[in-house]
Image: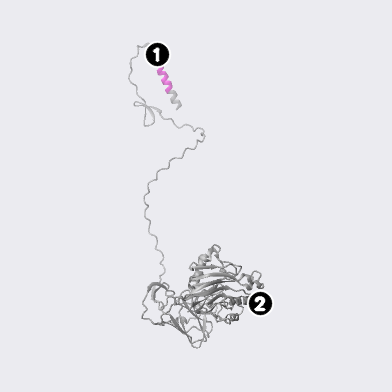
Amino acid sequence: MKKYLALIIAAVMVLMSLSILSSCNQEPPVDGKDGITPTIGENGNWWIGDLDTGVKAVSADGEAGDKGDKGDKGDKGDKGNTGSAGANGATGSNGAPGAAGADGNTPEMRVSPISYYLEVSYDDGESWEALDYRFDDSGVTEYEYPIEEMDKIGGTIANSNNKYVNSNEYCGSLIKVEDSVFDKLTLTKREGALEFGYAFLAKELKVNYSPSYATGYTKVVWTEEETVTLTIPDNARYLYVYHHSTDNFCLPTSIKFFKSGETPTVDENAIRIAIWNIGHFSMGGRPNSTISDSDYKTAVEDYKDFIYNAVDADVIGLAEYSAKFTPSNYAKASLFAGYDTAFEGTQSRYSCNALYSRVPISNIQQKAYECNKTAGPLHTSAIAASDYYYLTADLTINGETVKLVSTHLAFHSNLTDDTVNKNQILELLEIYEEYDKVIMIADWNVKEFSYFDLFTDAGYTLANTDETLYTYANSDKSLDNIIYKGVTVSDFTLAGTNLSDHYAVYATVTVE
């Protein structure tokens, strides 16, 4: 390129020289013709008219120079416009057919022969779910349960009605009686058997959980009678009939449901009163709840189900109570919101009483036992007689005032004659001697059932006179009882539960 440029410059200089020489010998110049403007041809050379000069108009790339310093970073550019959507891809080919699914069970339908609700089963009759439709039962008077369904011994764990229950030494059948159109049933003993047992339950039994005190309404009853006629409790869910694993204690040979034709009488003035040692929500093992906040939802459902369905008392006294149900939840709000009146006594170690009522009740007070002031030490240094006290209140039943006492007595396990406990009983008898109508509910902590003679000798009546009706789960003791004078008490019931080391007891109270 430099070579061509030099030639061009030389040519220009020669022409200029010739022009100068010519101008010296010639006449003054006249205007010349316009010259031809060079152009760049398609081949990139300079052209003069039709003449290709062969000189490139654009120089060839030179040798690379040294790399310059890095420039400053420029400002960020504006965001570009969103591009248009691309065209849909081609439809893929069909996949291979999936494996055939297992055959489903065709739902079965039936009319429950006990409740007359329409029921459906999705598991070939293993369990039945009641639908919201009930058939007319006006023409039905009785129903005999198909006993052949109960002749299997040592069956499976119960998880629905009409299933067989097998624990360590018991087996039998659960029969759902909830919403029964019948109000009574008759059980007939199997020929040659000595006894058979039955109980009304609130819930189904759990795996290896003794049915003697299942979560239910009654302690199991063993009978030697040939036939027994029972009234189905209004709030019972199941009838459980079972036997020991011997030939002498058999299932009944007949179960017949029937309508008595009797119109149930409801005494609007009758109230249900209960006492339950609730065990501080720790099965009585600690003076405070052992239920964690994470277990709150399940635990509160279990306790409420027992309180409002199994017991369902108008007035309930609670021994070994704790204000806290879990570390972050209070018992009053969590469990007893259905009660209008609440009284929580002072907690002193393992002693704490509470009283809840949804019927008229007044003048609730916490009172100390005077005899505690001279009582000796109890069985551990952590428990003293002074920890124990009683609650007193006035109940109004049928327009009459009834004195109510709810307490939890001291207990000394090492003394042959527990003078602390007896002195507390004697003090209560002395205080309430002047009143005509009195109900006392308590975990009495009696060392022997004969301690209750102190009450009967003073003119009181025991709601439970059966010392084999054990109310304490950890031993063969009947500690919890309802004791009264001047009122009528009926339908005494033990409500079994695994939520505490004590079972609840309740009864119906009326005043003439």
The chosen color scheme is one colour
**450 sits to left or right of 62:** right
504 in relation to 81, above or below: below
Q: Quadrant of the N terminus?
A: top left
The residue carrying pointer 1 sits among few (fewer than 14), some (14 to 19) or many (20 or more) residues within 10 Å by Cα, namely few
Q: Which mark is residue 506?
A: none
Q: Is residue 12 magenta?
A: yes
Q: Which mark is residue 415?
A: 2
Q: Residue at x 54, y 68 (%)?
A: 343
| Helix, strand or loop: magenta stretch | helix
Q: Which residues are magenta?
A: 8-16
Q: Which mark is residue 21?
A: 1
Which label's residue is closer to the chain start, 1 or 2? 1
**248 sits to left or right of 179:** right
Secondary structure type for disc 2: loop
Q: Residue 358 versus residue 312: which sits nearer the camera? A: 358
Residue 449 image offset from top left, x and y in percent: 59, 80
Secondary structure type for disc 1: helix
Which of the 4 quarters of the picture holds residue 182? Answer: bottom left
Residue 22 image offset from top left, x and y in percent: 38, 13
Look at the numbered discs 1 and 2 and tell me whether their residues touch, using CB distance below 8 Å.
no
Residue 35 image offset from top left, x and y in percent: 34, 22
Residue 315 image offset from top left, x and y in percent: 50, 72
